[in-house]
Image (tube, grey):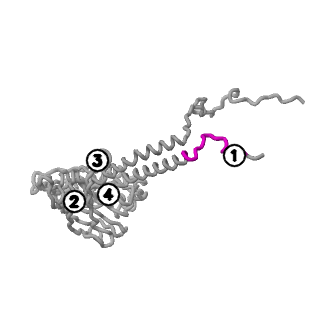
Amino acid sequence: MAADNSVTPTDASREPRENDPKDGAVYQQRMKAWYPILHPVWVIAALFVIGVVFIPVGFRLKQISDDVVELSVMYDGGKGTGECAITQPNQDKTCTHTFTVDRDMTSPILVYYEINNFHQNHRKYYQSRDDPQLLGRVGGQTKIQASDCEPLNQLGDITLNPCGLIANTLFNDIFKLVGGNSSDGKTLKMLENGVAWQSDLDYKYSQPTGFKSEQCTSCEDCACNPPDWSCINNEAYSETNDDGDTVCYRYFYPNDNTTQYLHETYPKVISPIKGVMEERFIVWMRTAALPRFRKLYGFIDKDISKGEKLTFEINANWIVNRFKGSKSLVLSTTSMFGGKNPALGNYFIGVGIACLLFALLFGLKHFLKPRKLADRKYLKYKEE
């Protein structure tokens, strides 16, 4: 019987198949590579350099954080505690709190509200919104969009616009700065515009399609009657402008008889002229990643001297005792890294000290009992 002299084809001799990877250095893993050898001297030197750099950087970061002036008060602790605690939603309780400035504060001085133990990062919560609706679409909601907004999509035959859990749990406490002077003796004013991201204002929110508004020449001559206008109780909307004058508007919302718009849900905090373009609403719609968070309410654009007293009037409506949370009012200056954050400097100092300690230990080990790199005596062979 003849011997089988056939040869199995090698990769070079066989015919290429359809799904073969390309014959390139990247695809065939033939690229040249550099594998660093962790020599003890270089490791010790690297740890020493990291420690020498990180420790002074950490102290500098800590100093920057300590330079930030922060004042805060928990006005509702959620268990009936706090000077402005409430037990029912929309209780309309008003109280005042006076801050005494313990150090000079440099503008801008940011005014936040801080909420604890409220999980905006829950998947059901942060998905509960209809983005096309927030961008102005009226009607035409898909089943998926309606499902995302449940259970706050409709109330009986009334459609909520905007729908969803985020929009309909809007923080509606009101803060007013009613007392305090700047370093130059002028009365302080808290500004509430300019707190939202400009990209959100430009691309993510818009009044409903068909909305229109008009400023009246006088409040006495400002009829707001259907069908051309849809003012609440056929009464024009009035507000005080930046000059302290009262101005009146009339407005029209489409499908107003079958739709509850944002200004109707939150008449105290949402202007019917701005609607979903109200900046405090847009700030709220940016959900927080952690259960304890701050959101920007306004800012003061004047410097404040040490010893000055700032009095805030707080109108409490947003309830926290049902989820065992708390609410605080916070005033803070800023630094190049944002607000007060001592943890960042402490992390740098901790890592630097750890690196120096490891450098010292490894250095002593290498000095007292050095080990030759790739010493064969440490190789262990299997016994035959």
Q: Residues within 10 Å of mark 2 (few under 14, many from 20)?
A: some
Q: Quadrant of residue 250?
A: bottom left
Mark 4–mark 1 Cα distance, whole angstroms, equals: 59 Å
* Residue beneath the point at 31% across and 69% down: 77
2 or 4: mark nearer the eye: 2
367 falls in the magenta region: yes
Q: Residues within 10 Å of mark 3 (few under 14, many from 20)?
A: some
Percent across and percent down for residue 361 are 51, 50
Q: What residue is disc 4 on?
A: 294
Q: Earlier in the sequence, mark 4 or mark 1?
A: 4
Q: What residue is disc 3 on?
A: 201
* Residue beneath the point at 75% across and 31% down: 8
Q: Earlier in the sequence, mark 2 or mark 4?
A: 2
16 falls in the magenta region: no
Mark 3–mark 2 Cα distance, whole angstroms, equals: 36 Å
Residue 278 visible here: no
Contact check, label 2 and label 1, Cβ < 8 Å: no
Q: Quadrant of residue 230?
A: bottom left
Q: What residue is disc 2 on?
A: 102
Q: Which residues are magenta?
A: 366-381
- Say which element carries label 2: loop
- Say which element carries label 1: loop
Q: Residues within 10 Å of mark 1 (few under 14, many from 20)?
A: few
Which quarter of the rendered picture does the N terminus lie within?
top right
Of residues 270 and 290, the one drawn nearer to the viewer in this rendering: 290
- Left or right: 77 as drawn, with respect to 3: left
* Residue beneath the point at 30% across and 49% down: 205
Percent across and percent down for residue 319 are 31, 67
Q: Amino acid at mark 3?
A: Leu
Q: What residue is disc 1 on?
A: 380
